[in-house]
Amino acid sequence: MWEGPQSPSHTMGPNVCERSRERKRPTVTGQRKHRGTPPIGSLLGYVPRVVLSILLASTAVLAVVFSGVVRGWEATISAFAISLAVPGNALSVGQVTYFGLGTPRPRGIDITELCSAVMIVAPLLLLSALLLLMVRFKIGTIFRALSAGFLIIVLANVIRIVMIAFGWDNFGTAGFAAAHQGYGSVFALMAFTAGMIVFIRLSFGRKGKPNK
């Protein structure tokens, strides 16, 4: 018996629904490809870390290679600091800090490699460069920690040189030896250790999220 034409919704409905469901189902292969391929944005966001890490590592190497120039800067800063604690004028020539100028006992301190803060700052720069390559650490956190550690180490070394000049000017050779090899060295060692601890504490104290 002829019942008339069937409605399109009655004959085509189930097939259309099944096709729409099939289109929404991602394939297993597509999911694996998506998981295995890092987003392009993440790769581009990592480029600044690599660039900054290379710059810090290069700075560390250049500071060691051209330590004479860096020690000249240290001598200039030390001369200014000594002039505030020791009578007479003070100035620097190369890596030597002269003080007590204009007094009967002018003297000079030669800032050698072992007396320079370069040997402590360079490893600090290399460690910062290494941490920058780890996305768990924020870039800003690393540079704040580096700045704090750098200032502590450099200022401590300047204070040590001032202590040597003050001891030498007031107590002669005995004062020089005591400040250079005694309490001055102990102070510098403690300050350098404190600078490294501050750097590590600030770097590892708060774990940052990867920068996007």
Image: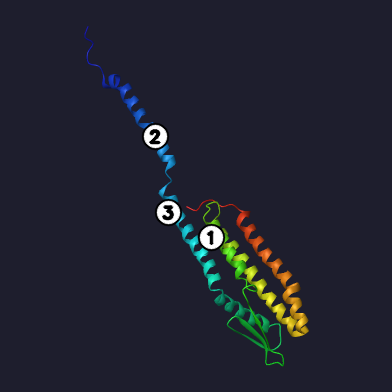
Q: Which residue is mark 3?
A: 44
Q: Which mark is residue 29?
A: 2
Residue in view at x 53 percent, y 71 percent: 65
Secondary structure beneath label 2: helix
Inter-mark Cα distance, 3 to 1: 18 Å
Amino acid at circle 3: Leu
Vertical arrangement, residue 180 with respect to residue 24, above or below: below
Image quadrant assignment for residue 37: top left
Label 2 environment density (alpha carbons within 10 Å; few <14, some 14–19, many ≥20)? few
Colour mapping: rainbow
Residue type indicated by callout 1: Ala
- CA gap between label 3 and label 2 equals 26 Å
Nearer to the camera, 154 or 179: 179
Could you tell me which secondary element the residue under label 3 belongs to? Answer: helix
Q: Residue at x 74, y 83 (%)?
A: 168
Residue 34 in the image: state x and y as whole percent.
Answer: 41, 40
What number is the disc on residue 157? none
Name the side, left or right, on which 17 lies relative to 107: left
According to the image, label 1 marks what residue? Answer: 129
Instruction: Left or right? Give the position of 162 relative to 55.
Output: right
Across and down, in percent, residue 103 comes to 70, 92
Examine the image and state in which quarter residue 89 appears.
bottom right
